[in-house]
Amino acid sequence: MMKGFERGRTVLEFDKVLENASACAYTEGGKKKILGTVPSEDRVVVERLLDETTEALNF
């Protein structure tokens, strides 16, 4: 039986999301970085990353 985090990754098809996102990468290094993405369970890290995403979007 899968527990919380892994079950969520499976249910949300996180690997498929990463695969689709990696198709947009311009470089092989970018693709590898995308495919190596691991969600964080640390609230502080998640909030910092969301702030960075918002900043990049605004830029």
Image: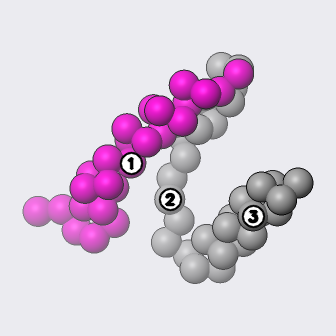
In the picture, residue 46 is in which quadrant? Answer: bottom right
Marked residue nearer the N-terminal end (2 or 1): 1
Q: Start and end of the magenta stretch?
A: 1-26
Query: 49 or 1, which is in the foreground?
Result: 49
Drawn side of residue 2 relative to residue 14, left or right: left
Marked residue nearer the N-terminal end (3 or 1): 1
For mark 2, what is the residue? Answer: 39
Q: Residues within 10 Å of mark 2 (few under 14, many from 20)?
A: few
Badge 2 vs badge 1, beta-carbon distance below 8 Å? yes
Task: Classify the position of the C terminus by image quarter.
Answer: bottom right
Find residue 40 and report its horizontal and vertical position in percent. 53, 65
Drawn side of residue 56 relative to residue 17, left or right: right
**In the image, what residue type sits under mark 2?**
Pro
Magenta includes 8? yes
Against 36, residue 10 (above or below) is below
Find residue 54 and report its horizontal and vertical position in percent. 75, 64
Predominant SS of the magenta segment: helix
For mark 3, what is the residue? Answer: 54
In the picture, residue 51 is in which quadrant? Answer: bottom right
| Residue under the point 18% across and 62% down | 2
Inter-mark Cα distance, 3 to 2: 17 Å
**In the image, what residue type sits under mark 1?**
Phe
Q: Residues within 10 Å of mark 3 (few under 14, many from 20)?
A: few
| Residue under the point 54% across and 36% down | 21
How many labels sit on residues? Answer: 3
Drawn side of residue 57 relative to residue 33, left or right: right
Find residue 32 and report its horizontal and vertical position in percent. 59, 30
Find residue 58 and report its horizontal and vertical position in percent. 83, 59
